[in-house]
Image (cartoon, rainbow, N blue to C red):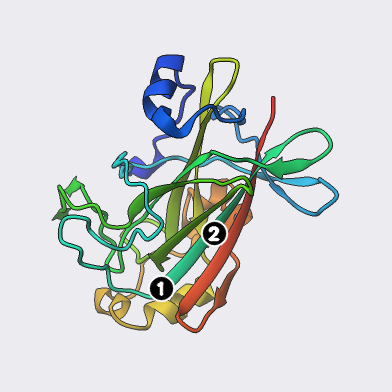
């Protein structure tokens, strides 16, 4: 059974929300995680495009790591090898007439390394319990921006190349919400990146976007536009969560 197909995500109780948020303070209202109603700013006019929510998958661990550079394991300080990726989220709140920056939203990111391995997981093919590489969160500023330094993900059997993310917030009404989805990459770019080491040592991946059943639930709207930089690659993803 492919655990990536198990849908998760729920409305948090007020007690759970307060326990999670701690010192981050009250956050703005986000769209309920039970439906695919996340959106992304399409233009300055305030129009928005639908961004579907996708399954969390089996490898989420709330490590409570508030950090921008998620490449290292905090215990050893060792960095994961791979092509550098500067990943920026522009998080907004969508209303009837406009999308405005969403401050104090917690953005979690986690993904596998260049060889398809996740940290802090006991899996039939690997055991990385206690390690915390390629995991972390950032809190958006007044501009709604959260920035991460990571690496281009590798692949593992049965999945296209992807990055998991979660946006969490509480509402002044006392309910809290979380939105979970995945980001994908252009196959041609992945071919070029994975032809290099250390990715190439794993061999050719077995699945492209078109055959990934999670990607086919709306992943074309979650494709990152990736540009080369002097150090590696950069991508920015715009996402606005709908006010109810």
- The image shows residue 25 at horizontal and vertical percentages of 49, 29
Residue 2 lies left or right of residue 100; in this view the side is left
* Quadrant in which residue 35 is drawn: top right
- Residue drawn at x 45%, y 30% is 9
Write down the residue under mark 2: 88
**Is residue 8 shown to the viewer in this render?**
no
Residue 41 lies left or right of residue 134; in this view the side is right
- Residue drawn at x 34%, y 58% is 70
- The image shows residue 73 at horizontal and vertical percentages of 22, 58
Q: How crowded is the residue under tag 1: few (<14 C-alpha within 10 Å), some, or many (20+)? A: many
Write down the residue under mark 1: 84
* Quadrant in which residue 81 is drawn: bottom left
Q: Nearer the viewer, residue 55 or 128?
A: 128
- Residue drawn at x 30%, y 45% is 59
Q: Which of 26 and 57 is in front in this view?
A: 26
What's the CA distance linking mark 1 and mark 2?
13 Å
Residue 145 lies left or right of residue 62; in this view the side is right
Instruction: Say what secondary structure mark 1 lies in.
Output: strand
Q: Are marks 1 and 2 in contact (CB under 8 Å)?
A: no
Q: Quadrant of the N terminus?
A: top left
Above or below: residue 189 compared with residue 182: below
Q: How crowded is the residue under tag 2: few (<14 C-alpha within 10 Å), some, or many (20+)? A: some
**Is residue 111 shown to the viewer in this render?**
yes
Instruction: Say what secondary structure mark 2 lies in.
Output: strand
Q: Residue 162 carries which label?
A: none
- The image shows residue 106 at horizontal and vertical percentages of 48, 40
Q: How many labels does the image show?
A: 2
Residue 136 lies left or right of residue 26; in this view the side is left
Q: Nearer the viewer, residue 21 or 98?
A: 21
Above or below: residue 183 compared with residue 100: below
Above or below: residue 228 compared with residue 187: below
Q: In which quarter of the image is the C terminus?
A: top right
């Amino acid at each position: 059974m492919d655990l990536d197909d198990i849908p998760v995500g729920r409305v948090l109780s007020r007690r759970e929300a307060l326990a999670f948020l701690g010192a981050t303070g009250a956050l703005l209202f986000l769209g309920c995680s039970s439906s695919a109603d996340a959106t992304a700013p399409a233009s300055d006019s305030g129009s928005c495009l639908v961004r579907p929510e996708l399954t969390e998958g089996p490898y989420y661990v709330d490590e409570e790591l508030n950090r921008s550079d998620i490449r290292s394991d905090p215990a050893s300080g060792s960095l994961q090898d791979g092509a550098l990726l500067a990943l920026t989220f522009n998080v907004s709140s969508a209303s009837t007439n406009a999308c405005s920056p969403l401050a104090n939203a917690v953005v979690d990111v986690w993904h596998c390394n260049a060889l398809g391995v996740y940290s802090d997981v006991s899996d039939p093919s690997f055991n990385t319990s206690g390690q915390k590489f390629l995991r972390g969160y950032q809190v958006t500023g007044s501009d709604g921006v959260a920035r991460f330094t990571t690496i281009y993900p590798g692949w593992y059997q049965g999945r296209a190349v992807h990055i998991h993310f979660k946006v969490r917030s509480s509402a002044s009404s006392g309910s809290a919400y979380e939105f979970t989805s995945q980001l994908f990459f252009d196959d041609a770019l992945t071919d070029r990146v994975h032809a290099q080491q250390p990715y190439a040592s794993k061999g050719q991946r077995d699945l492209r976007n078109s055959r990934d059943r999670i990607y086919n639930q709306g992943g074309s709207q979650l494709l990152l536009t990736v540009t080369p930089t002097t150090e590696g690659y950069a991508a920015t993803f715009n996402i606005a969560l709908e006010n109810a």
